[in-house]
């Protein structure tokens, strides 16, 4: 399916030529066209995207869309949804989206047997949720489970965590769901101190059941349970979600308490599978299904809308224009919504673990800058931190402003101020402030001519920073599903355009391997392949180890 490399398209050369010219183009000037906002915005699945503050016009869009055709984006989309093994370095299909599709679609793509497995896993999730909510899931001392600790990391954690925070209004009161991802013992101690072992259920989520952090956290949770519940069979306090059933059983999880995962669901896209179990417990299985339905709606839009009106495709092309052509290598993700505060972290994994690569499908170096460095924080906190750099450094940082039009709280006047700040930031980043304006402001404030000259350069803001504004009414499970799928598909399209495999993560794997070797050295093994820096740091640690 990989017929050509990124740079073989003539549109790429055209885009490079255009970039030089657009770099000095004022974004504000696009608004001389009174229809700019109407022409550069769109609605899909109850999500509104305003991209009129991007540094591009119809001309650039046409070249980007032409390049998408050259890269056979349409075929690639069909390939992913049709179950082709597009993750070719691991020889796997990429089918997280099928988990949110109707059963007949699941059957036609995966066959009857796997479709039945999916239905079985859903049923298992549903029953577990209901049992917990009704207070019918009992711990070994006969008390009903009141707290769930989900232990997992990366994709086996972030999706559920971010969605749970976003959907606070839908939380079920009967069971509290907590998460444990970090390997740091302080995180474990903090979490377990809140819980009563008699009424706690531990859900171990690990596709491989071999991730160091998850296994160590799970073992510590098991010791904690065992130390309190001596003389009891604690196996009912464990549920696992994994594709490695053998290892989960070896750990001590009953086979009937294991929910499956499949190799065609990548970790960072796995919230739609049983990995979403803690989320389903937190918001109720019906709401979890609604979230899948929202994602399915976005899947349909993505597969059917013409590219010029296709939200994930447009967001992907805009991002590529910014990073690969204009040379803006970062992306600030700025949710002006407290419930989305974990979203920048989640997106860091989904985006950077997917497209943070430089080798194309043919094993050659990609001649374009690929994934941006994604960072961000909820507004307005970010304004009092890194946004100074966005206004006045010599970096241009494109941004995605994400804002809910309605408030999640009764403090409506807070919400008005929050939204005003969001709109003010995107405007200020685009418009900036010239030296002339800075001087005029200072003169108006009554400063002496000398002080005006001295201070004015410090008040100049170059402006011309591009941004998207993504707007929605407050989150429902359905809308959140569509929103998460929007970013998933954006990232997929970017991978196709750059000609890379978005679905492996060999860089992360190297870290895991070295982590294991260094742990062995700390346990007494010798390893002369390590640098003297690392050897000495290990010695320093061993000298202090308690
Ligand atoms: O579910 P597992 O196998 O524990 O892996 C956890 C995470 O580790 C990674 O492999 C690397 O971060 C992710 O892709 C995955 O989500």
Image (cartoon, grey):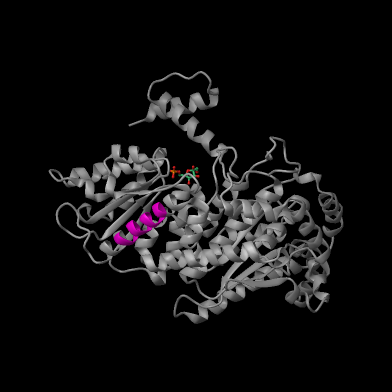
Camera sees residue 119: yes
**In the figure, 529 relative to 177: above or below?**
above
Type of secondary structure dominating the magenta stretch: helix
Residue 99 percent across, percent down from the top left? 47, 57
- Position of 228 compared to 493: left or right? left
Residue 268 percent across, percent down from the top left? 51, 50
- Position of 218 compared to 332: left or right? left
- Position of 307 compared to 337: left or right? right
Q: State the quadrant of the N terminus.
A: top right
**In the figure, 415 relative to 540: above or below?**
below
Which quadrant holds residue 148? Answer: bottom left
Say which of 373 and 258 sits in front: 258
Say which of 326 and 421 sits in front: 326
Q: Residue at x 73, y 68 (%)?
A: 53
Residue 333 percent across, percent down from the top left? 60, 60
Q: Which residues are magenta?
A: 116-127
Which quadrant holds residue 429? Answer: bottom right
Q: Residue at x 43, y 50 (%)?
A: 114
Camera sees residue 385: no
Q: Residue at x 41, y 56 (%)?
A: 276
Magenta residue check for 264 = no
Q: Residue at x 56, y 39 (%)?
A: 91
Number of residue marks: 0
**In the figure, 491 relative to 219: above or below?**
below
Q: State the quadrant of the C terminus.
A: top left
Residue 88 percent across, percent down from the top left? 60, 40
Magenta residue check for 124 = yes
């Amino acid at each position: 399916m990989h017929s050509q490399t990124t740079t073989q398209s003539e549109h790429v050369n055209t885009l490079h030529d255009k970039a030089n010219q657009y770099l000095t183009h004022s974004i504000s000037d696009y608004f001389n066209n009174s229809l700019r906002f109407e022409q550069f915005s769109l609605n899909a699945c109850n999500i509104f995207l305003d991209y009129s503050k991007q540094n591009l016009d119809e001309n650039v869009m046409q070249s980007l869309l032409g390049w998408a055709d050259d890269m056979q984006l349409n075929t690639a989309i069909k390939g992913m949804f049709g179950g082709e093994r597009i993750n070719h370095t691991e020889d796997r299909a990429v089918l997280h989206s099928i988990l949110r599709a109707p059963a007949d679609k699941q059957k036609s793509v995966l066959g009857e047997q796997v479709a039945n497995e999916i239905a079985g896993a859903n049923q298992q999730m549903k029953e577990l949720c209901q049992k917990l909510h009704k207070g019918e899931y009992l711990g070994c001392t006969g008390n009903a489970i009141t707290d769930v600790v989900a232990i997992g990391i990366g994709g086996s954690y972030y999706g559920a965590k971010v969605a749970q925070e976003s959907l606070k209004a839908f939380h079920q009161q009967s069971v509290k769901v907590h998460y444990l991802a970090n390997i740091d013992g302080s995180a474990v101690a903090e979490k377990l101190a809140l819980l009563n072992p008699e009424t706690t259920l531990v859900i171990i989520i690990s596709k491989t059941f071999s991730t160091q952090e998850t296994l160590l956290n799970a073992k510590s949770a098991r010791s904690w349970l065992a130390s309190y519940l001596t003389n009891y069979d604690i196996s009912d306090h464990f549920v696992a979600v994994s594709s490695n059933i053998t290892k989960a059983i070896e750990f001590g999880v009953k086979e009937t308490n294991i929910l499956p995962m499949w190799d065609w669901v990548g970790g960072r896209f796995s919230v739609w599978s049983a990995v979403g179990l803690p989320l389903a417990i937190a918001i109720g299985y019906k709401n979890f299904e609604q979230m899948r339905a929202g994602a399915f709606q976005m899947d349909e839009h993505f597969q059917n809308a013409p590219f010029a009106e296709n939200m994930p495709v447009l967001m992907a092309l805009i991002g590529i224009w910014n990073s690969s052509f204009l040379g803006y290598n970062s992306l600030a993700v700025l949710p002006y919504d407290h419930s989305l505060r974990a979203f920048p972290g989640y997106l860091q994994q989904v985006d950077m673990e997917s497209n943070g690569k430089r080798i194309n499908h043919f094993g050659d170096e990609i001649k374009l800058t690929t994934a941006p460095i994604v960072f961000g924080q909820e507004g307005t906190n970010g304004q009092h931190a890194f946004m100074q750099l966005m206004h006045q450094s010599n970096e241009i940082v494109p941004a995605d402003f994400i804002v809910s039009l309605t408030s999640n709280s009764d403090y409506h006047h807070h919400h008005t101020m929050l939204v005003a700040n969001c709109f003010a930031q995107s405007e200020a980043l685009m418009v900036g402030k010239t030296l002339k304006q800075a001087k005029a402001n200072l003169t108006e404030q009554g400063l002496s001519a000398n002080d005006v000259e001295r201070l004015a350069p410090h008040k100049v803001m170059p402006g011309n920073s591009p941004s998207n504004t993504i707007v929605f009414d407050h989150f429902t499970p359905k809308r959140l599903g569509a929103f998460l799928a929007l970013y998933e598909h954006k990232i997929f399209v970017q991978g196709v355009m750059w000609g890379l495999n978005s679905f492996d993560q060999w860089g992360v794997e190297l870290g895991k391997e070295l982590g294991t070797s260094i742990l062995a050295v700390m346990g007494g093994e010798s390893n002369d392949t390590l640098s003297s820096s690392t050897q000495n740091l290990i010695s320093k640690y061993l000298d202090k180890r308690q």
